[in-house]
Amino acid sequence: MSQKLQQQFMQAVALHQQGKLQEAGAIYEAVLKVLPRHPDALHLLGVVALQTGQYQRAADLIGKAIAINPGKGVYLLNRGKALQALSDLEAAVDSFNEAIRLQPDNAEAYFCCGNALCKMSRLESALVSYEKAIDLNSGYFEAHFNHGNTLMTLSRFEDALASFDRAIKLNNRIAPAHFVRGNALLSIRKLREAIDAYEAAIAIEHEFPEAWNNRGNALKQLGRHDEALSSYRKAIEIKEDYADAWLNASNVLSELKRSDEARQCMERAILLSPQLATTFLLTALYEKNAVCDWRNYAKNNDEFKNEVMNSSGLFECWPLLSMYDDPCLHKTAARKWIEAEYPEDNSLGKIKTEAGSKRIRIGYFSADFREHPVAMLMCGVLKAHDRSKFELFAFSSGVEEEGAVRSSIKKSVDHFIDINQMSDKEAALLSRQYEIDIAVDLGGHTKDSRMGVFSFRAAPVQVGYLGYPGTTGADYMDYIVADPVIVSADDYSNYVEKVVTLPSYQPNDAGRETSTIKHSRQSMNLPESGFVYCCFNDAYKITPSVYASWMNILKQVPGSVLWLRSGSQPVMSNLRYAASESGVMAERIIFAERMPTVTEHLARHRLADLFLDTLPYNAHTTASDALWAGVPVLTRKGKSFAARVAASLLNAIGLPELVTGTQEQYESLAIELAGNPGRLQDIKVRLEQNRLTAPLFNTDLYTRNLEAAYTAMYERYQSGLQPDHIILSG
């Protein structure tokens, strides 16, 4: 090369280094006109093409340079980048590997190879490449960052967090690094630390919608719903077409019982992201049902049922219980959800079988150790457990909420352990460290439950109980607790778990109090005379067919009223409108305002004559509340777990005649009891007599039966036997 040409080439290199790509490229081309086989000029012109998005041209030019001089690692590195940009990933990896062979100390080549391997979903190999890059250059921020992201994809959240921490130590002014660190913390339920990380990202880059959105997710999990909503709204303010933020806002508005706003946000999310329509149609339908907006109810429910059974979409299980009396559908949805969200994870290894010489250790897991129906039902059992045979652990995954119920539970167990801020894996490992023999899930597919803990096998025996009336769909759940009314042998195929059949299903606390306050009808806005039907179930359990039955009953019983639980304004407006449309005066629908205490709520039950149950989701705790207060419950028995609980309770209290099988029988009996005060009084007398003698409210008897079930499960495990159906005669 002549001196003049060499000077031209060096001028081009200098311009290139200054970022003047067009000028540098023109000179490289001029050099190549004179010396068409100049490898460095070909390579650098290819780099200019790479930097300006001309990837095929870059690959071709650099390929020519390699053909002339195959021993240059930098040529192979840059050709690999061009091939990766062209999505020719196999060839890109080959090119990076050849660059590494020629320059084994080239950290960038390992880094780029890791990126290509990630795109090929060869994640473990990608990790090795990133780690080699970091070994060669410990200050390689991007390698630490991508290493962490790859670990996140592999659900190795704790390891990812360590990578992000190292990256941030190198450069703490990169907002996305704080953001992904927040994601890692959120994944392992370090919620307050996650919020700090998102706020660090926002402090650097205020207009960061994803950080605002995920900050909202962490706040929501902490129960700080108003703050979460503000965070989602900020994300939407920055990015109006952010479908996920609209969806999250919808979910938190639902938690806040602001159903109309929730539905509007859901509709906006679906408009922005039509692929959400199928998956989140259930949420939209549930929100409509929750406010008793029954427009197109049958059509929507039929279409959605077909989606659940025949599509690959994921649908939350809980809302389905109040929409369909179909245990097969419930099982199908639960299986899909578990396989996608909480698949079995064997990373903690098998649990060793321990000799059975100690007390059986029972671990109760719940997000609801507070003023909640599940906790209130369990209080008596926890007090009645035989502590000489059983050691009790309460693993609380809910937000800290002190009160009488939580205080009672803390006093009733040997160990009360807060796992709210632990990851599922950490909580499962802790359970193993405590050598829990039987882990009992009191949540299932309900709000804030922790099925993920059980996916890691928290104990050798795992049981679903009380909180979720249906199969979890998880093979790692060994047993589900029921009774012969709720699950017969013919129903076993609808449950993934083996069925433990107690003489009666629902626990109750015989020591619970009822206020001695005597409420008057006038104080509750009830008429001085006339028959009072009541139902204190949540509005989402009221279906059009149930309400139609109630209106038929009211029309046949002059002067009667229906006393319902107070809800949002849309709920009450919709129910009054539906009454008017059916020919019943809206004034005959009376709403019971929330009482200051549960005991006062129980006391006001005495003003009612008959509790009318719902289907397909029966009254559960609300039914036992009514029975405890002396109010008979009329129910229809369905097919699913949730549709049979009230029938179970009535059998356990000795009033099976109040269980009907059809809508006609249900309406007929409700009308007859209103017109036959003698028969109703006989039922009430028997209810009062049975209340303290029948199994339903015999806490000690119930607990002994439950303990016998636990012992049978434990002995099967100790004998090396697989779980099997267990039937206790009582």
Image (spheres, rainbow, N blue to C red):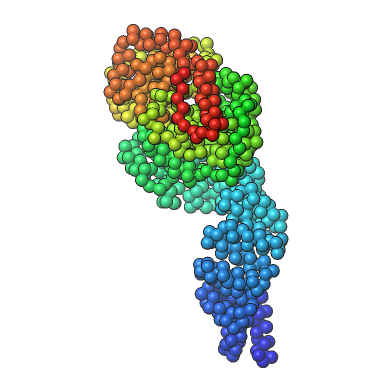
Where does the N terminus fall, quadrant-wise?
Answer: bottom right
Residue 498 visible in rendering: yes
| Residue 642 in picture, x, y percent from top left | 41, 29
- Number of numbered discs visible in the structure rendering: 0
Residue 646, placed above or below residue 343 = above
Q: Residue furthest front?
A: 719
| Residue 451 in picture, x, y percent from top left | 53, 38
Residue 42 visible in rendering: no
Q: Residue at x 39, y 22 (%)?
A: 647
| Residue 317 in picture, x, y percent from top left | 44, 38
Q: Residue at x 57, y 18 (%)?
A: 384
The reply, left or right, for residue 24 in relation to residue 684 is: right
| Residue 651 in picture, x, y percent from top left | 40, 18
Quarter of the figure with residue 222: top right
Quarter of the figure with residue 504: top left
Which of 349 and 612 lies nearest the eye of the viewer? 349
Which of 518 and 359 lies nearest the eye of the viewer? 359
Which of 430 and 711 lies nearest the eye of the viewer? 711
Quarter of the figure with residue 358: top right
Q: Residue at x 56, y 31 (%)?
A: 718
The reply, left or right, for residue 404 in relation to residue 317 is: right
Residue 207, placed above or below residue 388 = below
Q: Residue at x 53, y 61 (%)?
A: 119
